[in-house]
Image (cartoon, rainbow, N blue to C red):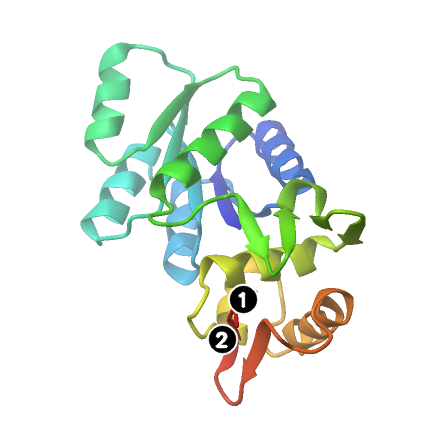
Amino acid sequence: MKMLIVEDQNELRELVKNFLEDYGYVVDEAEDGEEGYSKINMNSYDCLILDLNLPKLDGMEIAKKVRKEGKSVPIIMLTARSEIYDKIEGFDNGADDYITKPFDMKELLARVEAVLRRTQKGQTLVLKFGDYEVLPKENLLKKEGEEIQLTNKEMGILEYLLHKRGEIVSAEELLEHVWDSEVDMFSDTVKTHIKTLRKKSDPKKKYIQTVRGKGYVYKES
């Protein structure tokens, strides 16, 4: 899943980015509100982590704009302030959760996972791939007596296809959700990673199917 962290404190922004990437998330970053809002309009994210007090455009204004445009992406607001009226205003403007600085990284991870569970309508973070249990944090497919180790990108692709089961997903959509914004959109990287994912877990192409000219779809027989 793909996140955006908008935070003007460089050290904290990099700490959050690196921590979430260690848990298998793809994370873009922005250091001010205008850059963050621009990235929101150019990319598709599964969660936004916004500092309240940002240069150029603050987190509250970003949340207002995102909700006014009809986007339902979960928003977690970061702030150094703890006054109750700030939290109420944040929720009124579309924030899904609120965390006050300083915070423990594991608390942030728990908040991210909680808002994803609440907002993934009809979906679950407990995933099955054929007979395998999918463990995204460990990049593992597991069933009795057998484990398959995946890379971060292979797991990202699989997790996204599972969440979109039955829907055709284009290579461009996978690039947007599984890679950061620096990826070359014209490369064959998706095709290459689909090939290695299939080789490890679906060599007969039973579940991950190619729809010629359109993309890929996960289907269960």
Q: Look at 36% across and 58% down and name the residue there.
A: 41
Residue 174 badge: 1
Answer above or below: position of 53 versus 125.
Answer: above
Query: Which amino acid lies under the numbered mark 1 shown in the image of this protein?
Result: Leu
> Can see residue 56?
no
Residue 146: x and y, percent? 79, 51
Neighbourhood count class around disc 1 (C-alpha, 10 Å): few under 14, some 14–19, many 20 upward:
some
Residue at 33% over, 48% down: 121
Q: Which mark is residue 170?
A: 2
Q: CA distance from mark 2 to mark 1?
A: 6 Å
Kind of residue at disc 2: Ser
Mark 2 touches mark 1? (CB < 8 Å)? yes
Q: Is residue 98 left or right of residue 108?
A: left
Q: Kindly identify which numbered label has been placed on residue 141.
A: none
Tell me the SS state at disc 2: loop
In the figure, is residue 12 to the left or right of 139?
left
Residue at (25%, 36%) from the top-left corner? 94
In percent of width and height, residue 91 lies at 24, 28
Which residue is located at x 53 percent, y 43 percent?
126
